[in-house]
Amino acid sequence: MTHYTLSHLDAAACLWEAVLDLRDHPAAEPDDLARALAIRKSFKAIGTCTMRVIVVGWIDAVDAAWYRIQNTCPFCFDWSFVKQWVIDTIDWSDPDNPAIHMGLGLSSNRNGAIAVTGAGSQSHLLARPQLTRNDHVALLARIRAALDTPDSLDAAARATLIEVIGASESGLRVCALPWPIDVHLGIIEHRHGVNFYAGLSRDALFAEMANYARECWQEIGDRRDPHTLPDDEVITAYFDDHPSESHSTEILRLEPVPSVRPARSIESGAYCVLSTAHLTVQTAGLLDKWACWPPSDRPIDIAASVYGWFVPTRPLPGDRQVQIPADLSRLIVFGRDRGFQFLLLDCDGDRAADLPVHDW
């Protein structure tokens, strides 16, 4: 079962309010009116109950977008950012499946405006951009070049690359199939029934179907050794000569569908494991005490493990930040700066060379 924190519930409420507001109170602009009509069509097609569950499935994506820009975004999360995120990120073109655009992220530009960005995109809304395998290979090449020659990137170029990586990460997170693939399908009909074959290439498919033909080669009058013949020739010769068996092939293209329907939604996040030796004994005692408090009373949303604690790395409000000991704050910043959403503080975890160690 997926467990949600208070921050998750707050994000879900904000998302639902934003969807209802965009549906019921659109601005007088053509795009806003068209969006409102599209949202109403979705409500009519799938119903309010299903729509609520779909909207809840956007929590991770909107949190990830906010996490990347919260320190520079001039807008508040609940009244401005979430609504703009829904406008820029959700595709309402299919009434039965309102879903997140593939490969998009949000950033705040120098003028404070929220822009949609993605691998190879411009700073405006794109109509369902298509991530390809070549795009991903090109991004990996850029990352490798940046690691090989880090001094070749200025601050702006480095920030842009990090943003593109984040957008690609978000796209892969919301879709199990990251880019279109062609699946080669084959069918062999014989007296015992039907065999189905599939491969990611023509050669892979033919290799499987040729194995069948070689196993049954004695049923035709060809005296050649089928193991000396190439796969396509074996298939052609066998089915041309066989009196009752036949075969067919086709190519099926599978397109990415970044659906967030709850039946297939699994919450996930990135975390790193650090030794509890990076905490003082006093802070360890505090974490033990906080873990026993009701969630609403804790200064930070932690969860106790067998040998330590899970700690989120998101920035805390000022009134809560002052309650966090300096050694724990240092670890939270350490994890957040490296792109981790959580820390697992474990007595058997590794010690980081650039963090203080406390023997206790």
Image (cartoon, helix red, strand yellow):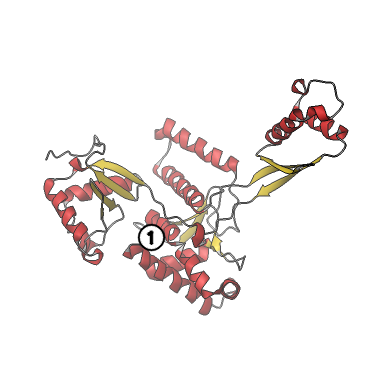
Mark 1 Cα-neighbour bin, 10 Å: few <14, some 14–19, many ≥20:
some
Q: Is residue 90 left or right of residue 356?
A: right
Residue depicted at 12% across the width and 46% down the height: 281
Q: Nearer the viewer, residue 129 or 308?
A: 308
Residue 76 visible? The answer is no
Marks counted in the figure total: 1
> Residue most toward the front?
192
In which quadrant will I find the N terminus?
bottom left
> What residue is shown at x 20% (from left), y 43% (from top)?
276
* Horizontal side, residue 188 vs residue 343: left or right: right
**Amino acid type at image mark 1:** Cys
Q: Relative to residue 62, is residue 182 drawn left or right?
A: right
For the C terminus, the quadrant is top left
Question: Where does residue 151 sit, x and y in percent of width and height?
Answer: 39, 34
**Vertical order, 141 against 132 (above or below):** above
Q: To which quarter of the image does residue 79 belong?
A: bottom left
* Residue at figure coordinates x 60%, y 51% from the top left: 130
| Quarter of image, res 133 | top right
- Residue 242 location in percent, x, y? 85, 34
Label 1 sits on a secondary structure element that is loop
Residue toward you, 125 or 177? 177
The residue that mark 1 highlights is: 73
